[in-house]
Image (cartoon, helix red, strand yellow):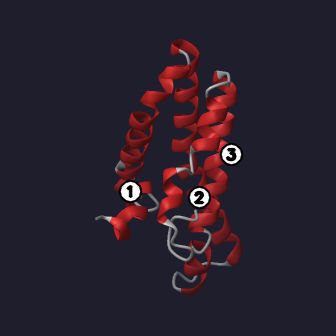
Amino acid sequence: MLCFPKTDLPLVAWVALVPLLYQLTRSTLRQGFVLGAVTGLFAFTGLVYWTSDVMVTYGGLSRWVSVGALLALVGYLAFFTTIFGGLTALACRLGGAQAILISPVLWVGCEIFRKYPWGGFPWCQFGYSQVGVLP
């Protein structure tokens, strides 16, 4: 969350997943799914919290409906980090700690799949945090 606007610290993106990856290397499949879900719920709640206010102000929805829609959106986005966590934990169980090297492929794959279904939601992808430091 710190690598996106408001705080705008793009270097944080380079280490943001280190605690998760460290835990996934020693997790069971189920623990991997749970770790991915908790990470996704926490991160996306902090990133898209403002959409509830937008739905009330510009969409004319009641506060309760907008909070329900926000929770659904956060759940949808967290689904992809849940899949990432489970698959990475599985890869580490099957191939040892060196299997963590496939985690970048899994992460990018989950971000790509998050981008396209149902019209997609291409917001909050790690690559976007680096736009200010392209050189």
Assess disc 3: are there few (<14), some (14-19) or many (≥20) residues with their C-alpha within 10 Å of its C-alpha: some
CB of mark 3 within 8 Å of CB of mark 1?
A: no
Quarter the N terminus occupies: bottom right
| Residue sitting at the far bottom | 57
Choose top left, top right, bottom left or bottom right for residue 26: top right
Residue under numbered circle 2: 44
Q: Earlier in the sequence, mark 3 or mark 1?
A: 3
Residue that numbered label 1 is attached to: 127
Foreground mark, 2 or 1, reads 1
Q: Residue at x 64, y 42 (%)?
A: 19
Q: Circle 2: is it few (<14), some (14-19), or many (20+) Cα within 10 Å? A: many
Q: Is residue 15 above or below residue 64?
A: above
Q: Amino acid at mark 2?
A: Phe
Q: How far across and how far down the image is residue 62, in percent?
A: 66, 78
Q: Quadrant of the C terminus?
A: bottom left
The one nearer the camera, 114 or 135, is: 135
Quadrant of the rendered image containing residue 37 = top right
